Image (tube, rainbow, N blue to C red):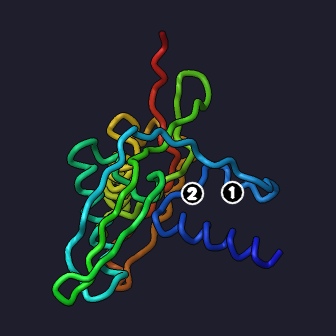
C-alpha cells in the first residue's frame, strides 16, 4: 500500500511540474483516472546530444536535441518527450565527456469529445503570466501564456481561452506590492467539425 501511495505521489508531482493535470483529477471520490490516449507516428526519431560532464546532463542535452528535431519536422505538439513511445538512451564517453543518443517515437495526446459541438483535451493546462500593474492586464498575460503552452501540446486549434472548460484564475500581489501576477488553469477545447 505504501508503494502504491508513493507511486501516486510521484505521478502527481510530475504532472504539477509540467503544469498539466487531468481534468477529472479534482474529484476526490474517483479512485482511478483513465490514462490519456496518444496518437503516435510510425517512425522512431533518433538524436545525439552534446557533450557534458555528467551522464544526467548528457541525457538532458540529448532529449533537448530530440525535441528540437521533432519540433522542426512535425510541429510543437509532437515534441513532448513525456508523451513519446518507447524512449531509450545509449550513452558513451567522447573526449573525456559523456554523450548520449536518444530514440523515441513522437506522440501527441488525443482529444476526447466533451459535449455537443466541442472537442476537449483530457488534461487541464496551467500557466502563469508576467507581472503587470493592473490586475486585468495580469490576467491577460496569464491567458496569453496559457495559449502558448496549449499550442505546444495540441497545436493552434485549441488555444482559444473562451472555448475552454473549467476556467480558474488566481491573482496575487508581487513581493513589493506594486504589481499583480496571475495563474490560469483550464481544459483546452475546440469546435467539433460536423460532417
Q: Residue at x 58, y 46 (%)?
A: 36
Instruction: For residue 133, say whether it is visible.
Output: no
Q: Is residue 1 above or below residue 70?
A: below
Q: Alpha-carbon distance for marks 2 and 1? A: 9 Å
Q: Is 194 positioned to the left or the right of 24 in the image?
A: left
Q: Residue at x 34, y 52 (%)?
A: 79
Q: Residue at x 57, y 57 (%)?
A: 21
Q: Which residue is mark 2?
A: 21
x and y percent of residue 87 in the render? Answer: 44, 59
Q: Residue at x 53, y 48 (%)?
A: 167
Q: Is 112 positioned to the left or the right of 75 in the image?
A: right
Camera-side residue of 151 and 87: 87
**N-term mark: 2 or 1:** 2
Label 2: how many residues lie within 10 Å, few (<14), some (14-19) or many (20+)?
many
Label 1: how many residues lie within 10 Å, few (<14), some (14-19) or many (20+)?
few
x and y percent of residue 6 in the render? Answer: 70, 76
Q: Quadrant of residue 62?
A: bottom left
**Dot label at residue 185:** none
Q: Secondary structure at mark 2?
A: strand
Q: Are marks 2 and 1 in contact (CB under 8 Å)?
A: yes
Q: Quadrant of residue 131?
A: bottom left
Image quarter hosting the N terminus: bottom right
**Dot label at residue 26:** 1
Q: Is residue 67 above or below residue 37?
A: below
Amino acid at each position: 500500500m505504501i508503494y502504491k501511495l508513493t507511486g501516486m505521489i510521484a505521478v502527481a508531482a510530475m504532472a504539477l511540474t509540467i503544469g498539466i493535470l487531468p481534468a477529472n483529477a479534482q474529484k476526490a471520490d474517483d479512485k482511478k483516472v483513465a490514462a490519456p490516449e496518444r496518437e503516435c507516428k510510425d517512425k522512431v526519431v533518433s538524436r545525439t546530444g552534446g557533450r557534458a560532464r555528467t551522464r544526467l546532463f548528457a541525457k538532458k542535452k540529448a532529449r533537448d536535441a530530440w525535441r528540437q528535431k521533432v519540433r522542426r519536422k512535425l510541429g510543437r505538439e509532437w515534441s513532448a518527450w513525456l508523451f513519446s513511445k518507447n524512449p531509450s538512451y545509449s550513452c558513451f564517453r567522447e573526449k573525456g565527456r559523456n554523450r548520449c543518443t536518444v530514440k523515441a517515437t513522437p506522440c501527441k495526446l488525443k482529444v476526447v469529445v466533451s459535449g455537443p459541438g466541442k472537442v476537449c483535451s483530457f488534461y487541464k493546462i496551467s500557466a502563469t503570466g508576467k507581472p503587470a500593474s493592473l490586475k486585468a492586464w495580469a490576467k491577460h498575460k496569464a491567458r496569453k501564456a496559457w495559449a502558448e503552452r496549449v499550442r505546444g501540446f495540441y497545436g493552434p486549434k485549441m488555444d482559444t481561452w473562451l472555448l475552454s472548460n473549467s476556467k480558474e484564475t488566481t491573482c496575487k500581489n508581487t513581493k513589493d506590492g506594486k504589481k499583480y501576477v496571475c495563474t490560469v488553469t483550464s481544459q483546452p477545447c475546440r469546435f467539433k467539425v460536423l460532417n
